[in-house]
Amino acid sequence: MKELERFESKVCKTENCHLWEASVGGSGYGQFYTGRVKFSAHRKAYELYIGDIPKGMLVCHSCDNKRCVNPEHLFLGSQQDNIDDKIMKGRHPRGDFHVSSKLSETKVKDIKRMIGDGFTHSFIASAYGVARSTISMAASGANWGNLT
């Protein structure tokens, strides 16, 4: 069986996405094996249907479905392009949902109120057990810019 036929035998084509139905890794992306070499299914789909992937480029999904291998939903981009796409679509974890967040939305609102009341960033940082830069970033809107 040719590689393309073997690949397509593992795909369920829906009206929009072409869903990978074989092995899926812990990250949620399909896995396709050629001999002992493992490929991400969406990257292999890009190579099979569109062409080579330049070194350092990612294969991104316009549909945001990790199991999709529809070549019409795949595009090349840099890491920054992928991040920008995620932010534009509102899929970037923010605030309380960000894995490294040290503050909550409620705390940031309190911090902004305390700054307005004249407390120093150093005092607030000590009170919340975080670095002064964390308070400065929250106050300036660099982090938690979604809060007013």
Image (tube, helix red, strand yellow):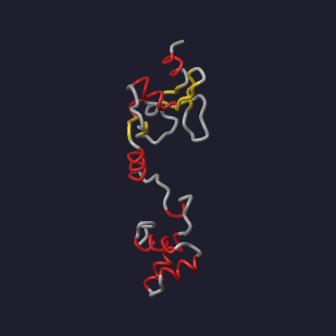
Q: Residue 11: horizontal and vertical position, in percent?
A: 52, 26
**Number of numbered discs on residues:** 0
Residue drawn at (48%, 86%) of the image: 119
Location of residue 117 (image quadrant): bottom left
Q: Quadrant of the C terminus?
A: bottom left
Above or below for 84 versus 4: below
Q: Residue 100: horizontal and vertical position, in percent?
A: 56, 60
Above or below for 134 versus 1: below
Q: Residue furthest bottom?
A: 118
Q: Quadrant of the N terminus?
A: top right
Residue drawn at (57%, 39%) of the image: 28
Q: Residue 118: horizontal and vertical position, in percent?
A: 44, 87
Q: Nearer the viewer, residue 65 or 2?
A: 2
Residue drawn at (47%, 31%) of the image: 43
Above or below for 82 versus 148: above
Q: Residue furthest top?
A: 1
Location of residue 142 (image quadrant): bottom left
Direction from residue 3 to residue 145 in the image, left or right: left
Above or below for 72 versus 100: above
Q: Residue 66: horizontal and vertical position, in percent?
A: 51, 39
Q: Nearer the viewer, residue 18 or 146?
A: 146
Q: Nearer the viewer, residue 143 or 130?
A: 130
